[in-house]
Amino acid sequence: MSGQTRAGAATPEPPATELLRVTDLVKHFRAPRAARRRGQAVVHALCAVSFSVGSAETLGIVGESGSGKTTLLRTILGLQQPTSGQVLFLGRDVSQRKGRSDLALQREISVVFQDPYTSLDPRMTVADILAEPAQIHGLAANAQKARTLLDQVRLPATGLRKFPHEFSGGQRQRIAIARALALNPKLIVLDEPVSALDVSVQAEILSLLRELQRERGVSYLFVAHDLAVVAEISQRVGVMYGGQMVELGPTRQVITEARHPYTRELLAAVPVPDPRIERAKPRFLQRRWPTETDNLPPCAHGDLL
């Protein structure tokens, strides 16, 4: 049943060894002025989202723009406080971290951003970029560690003396991944890490991430808008729509037994090379789905099935 117990309500399927647990996460923002004029006070950005990520596991989160993915990531990373709910990492409440505990948690969780052209400081050499995480945390950084990191992302050590603009987009993303590995984190949050890359380069980066996971036992929270990309790397998939996790379960099960209509629409949108098959695919876009700015009852999408 793809991790669902009722229409439109996703129930988390806990992994064997739990690393991250998100429970009933809710985040409200003040509604835009135009919406307030219509009587809507808040925007329901996240509606009782729950899931977990296990050790050495990849959980993929897929959804379109405005589905709540970015708000979810920012809340998990402690960049904003939830309205209610809880984010636990290794049993510690992310929202309560302060001082030394904050730095300790930062060492355990790393981030790879979407755009490799803006996520790396153009004024720093690759050696400086890879040394920066250790320096921030008061740890020793050396050239050998930087060479090892570059080798792990399949880049030559000669790149240490270069600047980001001297690399291609795919190579820059490899450098960003190497930086994320610098402190040996247990969890890496990947925010649309391949969407700015060519398809062939996307495949190379996904292959690299799988290899690194096998070698290092790191967990990934992989967020994207492309279901095909998410399915390629994830053991489990969560589908977000309008601030809700509308479907959650093992990747193969979600793809072959999708229950929520939005998940089925995402699957139908994946292009097929054969034009005859593409033309024969069912089309589900026959109604307007509600958005997070619609004045809906809180988190009520269960009637869409």
Image (spheres, rainbow, N blue to C red):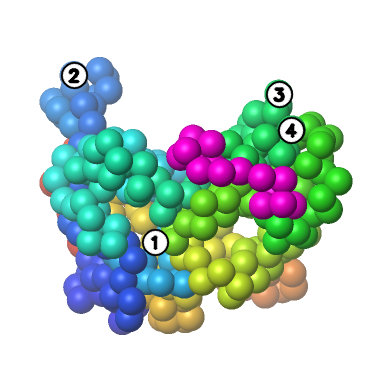
CA separation in Å, label 3 and label 4: 7 Å
Q: Is mark 2 on a helix, strand or loop?
A: helix
Residue receiving disc 4: 125
SS under mark 3: loop
Q: Which residue position holds label 2?
A: 37
**Which of label 3 and label 1 is nearer to you?**
3
Q: How far apart in space, not on screen, are marks 2 and 3 (Cα)?
A: 46 Å
Secondary element at tag 4:
loop
Query: In front: mark 2 or mark 4?
Result: 4
Q: How far apart are marks 2 and 4 (CA)?
A: 51 Å
Residue at 33 percent of width and 76 percent of height? 17
Q: For the residue carrying disc 2, how many other residues have a C-alpha within 10 Å: few (<14), some (14-19), or many (20+)? A: few
Tag 4: residue type? Thr
Image location of residue 190, percent across then percent down: 52, 52
Q: Quadrant of residue 13?
A: bottom left
Tag 1's secondary structure?
A: strand
Q: Is the magenta stretch mostly helix, strand or loop?
A: helix
Residue at 72%, 52% (x, y): give it. 144
Q: Which amino acid does label 1 sit on?
A: Val
Task: Decide: few, some or many residues near mark 1? Use Cα within 10 Å; few <14, some 14-19, many ≥20.
Answer: many
What are the residue bounds of the magenta stretch? 133-147
Q: Name the residue carrying label 1.
A: 239
Location of mark 3 (residue): 123
Quadrant occupied by the C terminus: bottom left
Q: In this view, does 78 lie above or below 20?
A: above
